[in-house]
Image (tube, helix red, strand yellow):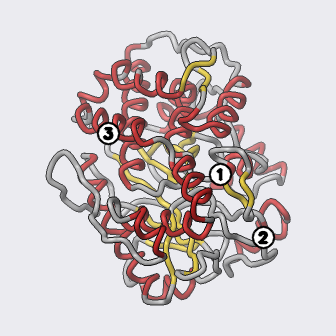
Amino acid sequence: MLRIGAEEEFHLVEAGSGRLVPRAGAVLERLAGAGFAPELQRSVVESNSGVHDTLDGLLADLTASRRRLAATASSLGLAVVAAGTVPLAALAPGDVTDDPRYRHMAERYRRVADEQLVCSAQVHVDVPDRDTAVRAMCLVSPWLPPLLALSASSPFWLGADTGYASWRTMLWQRWPTAGPAGCHCGADSYDALLADLLRSGVISDPGMVYYDVRPSAHLPTLELRICDACPRVTTVVLVAGLFRALVHDACARLARRDPPGCDGHHEWLRAATWQAARTGLEGPLVDPVTRRAAPARTVLAGMPARFRPALEASGDWDTVRELLDAALADGSAARRLRCTAGQLGQAAAVRLLAAETRGATSGAARAARSGGPGRSTGATASRPLAPGPGTGRGT
């Protein structure tokens, strides 16, 4: 059984106006114990889950963390939003967390760091060793753009509709090490690349390798980094289940010494990622097998069957199918946001995001319309939930 964990990043906004505010320090002061941390921008709080065997355990953990964070923020007149970007944000250059690493990043990368008003969801899956993690990157990479499409939640940037489902992706790709990971024959090759990057001065530490998937810099895991933060916690759990299946399948293929099925050229993956960011679930994706355009729903609906042995080995088959069916029926968060903003304005879209983030489902649309909080119905799972222990670190 490959264990899983997740890191989630959350925007802090004023509860009334929905505007992004740099209040992470005040929120973190009131959160006792481990599990929460600052990020580069003072408007973001990171939450780290425990390590779990089951998707149910992960769901319970993330749900509890979100509720705790939302309640703490509410006591300060704030709301918490899980989304790639928030509609009502304004640039404030130099408004970074007072930490030597973050100050260096702000000075070194300037506008790129200033505009890092983005949040992501990251998933960790256990791997036997670093060599396996590096070699598995090549096998899982073609399937990452569909996971981005599932998570797409950032159509707005600085008050404007970008025309993209995930504008966070376009902002994120400006970092010098962002994008597809490429192919490596093993850990020695990958670590030599890291050493070259560090010697070049382009990055200052291994944690600044921002590939779409990477061996964690501090945990024995393979880490998924391509996704937007997700308003609905069930989307994070769905992505985690699919990514665990990808890693399980890759590890099994490597153990059997199956041909990798990769020509070493990952340039097409950047194009596939752009396509997923552009249209999310509401348009075509680049099919990972044929490399031709195919409806997003067709590509994603075919993933459980293709990776069924891995899903069944982890006990995730039923849960992933149920969550995927619901996600495809509802459409992307980007679509929901556009619909709400078009009818009721961007402040209402932020209220919808905040309601979904704290676990309100049936009350979310009502909250967006009224400007008040929705009734929190919590998240659901196909089996009983049980909480679990602490994971990692973000940017």
- Nearer-the-camera pick, 338 or 127: 338
Where does the image place residue 311, in percent across and percent down from the top left? 29, 29
Seen as rendered, the residue at the extreme left is 384
Q: Nearer the viewer, mark 1 or mark 2?
A: 1
Q: Amino acid at mark 1?
A: Pro
Q: Amino acid at mark 2?
A: His
Residue 322 at least partly seen: yes
- The residue carrying pointer 3 sits among few (fewer than 14), some (14 to 19) or many (20 or more) residues within 10 Å by Cα, namely some
**Residue 144 appears left or right of 320:** right
Q: Nearer the viewer, mark 3 or mark 1?
A: 1
> Upstream in the sequence, badge 1 or badge 2?
2
Residue wearing tag 3: 2
Residue wearing tag 2: 104
Spatial distance from mark 3 to mark 1, Cα to Cα? 34 Å
Residue wearing tag 1: 155
**Residue 1 appears left or right of 150:** left
Spatial distance from mark 1 to mark 2, Cα to Cα? 30 Å
